[in-house]
Amino acid sequence: MDLERALAKTLLKDENLEKIEPRVRPQNPASHWARPILMERAAYLKEMARFGDGSASEIVREFPGHFAMLLFRSRSGEAEIDAKHAHLLVVLGGAATLVTGGKVKGARAMGPDETRGDSIEDGTEQPLRPGDVAHVPAGVPRQLLLTGEQTISCFVMKMEWLEEEKNRKRS
């Protein structure tokens, strides 16, 4: 028993003080990522991409039903369809063209919920610049296209697409 508790017990003559647990400060369940930290990690991913295929990513944090990640690209990516996750992209730096919708050419299954291919035919193109935010629902083809010396760094939230949302979309 520490000195404060012993003194309080003596002065207050309260036997219940021994039963009281010290208060634990609750942790904040919210997450915050400062831009300088994200940009530092994006610079690291840029270096990693130089030794690979021109892209690198890392999971920042996992949550129930979704996760946050950082993505760096110095070349165009494959066309992708993620049947399970919606993607929310926040452009931190660089520029690219996001192609969504349409049909994936050369589609091949990479797993039960993921398809990849060479390109997207008849998709919608949208330029992405720093500060832009894009949402791509689960099941919608997407592809990031880069030209010349373009690079792009994005903060990405991948969120499980709930069955109720799929059903509502079909109605």
Image: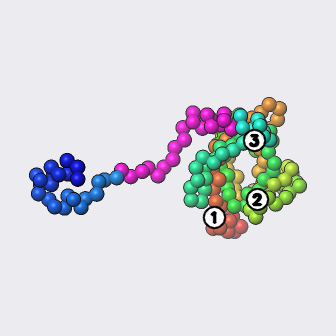
Q: Earlier in the sequence, mark 1 or mark 2?
A: 2
Say which amino acid is labelled 2.
Glu
Q: Work out how far the residue at label 3 is from the one at label 1, CA to CA, in angstroms.
A: 29 Å
Tag 3, which secondary structure? strand
Are the residues flagged by discs 3 and 2 in contact, CB closer than 8 Å? no
| Segment colored magenta | 25-46
Compared with 5, 127 (above or below) is: above
Q: Nearer the viewer, residue 81 or 98?
A: 81
* Residue 168 appears in the picture as rendered: no
The residue that appears at 15% across and 54% down in the rendered structure is: 9
Say which amino acid is labelled 3.
Ser
Identify the mark at residue 55; answer none if there is no mark. 3
Q: Nearer the viewer, residue 18 or 109?
A: 18
Say which amino acid is labelled 1.
Leu
Question: Quick check: is 45 in the magenta stretch?
Answer: yes
Q: Position of residue 58 (x, y in %)?
A: 66, 45
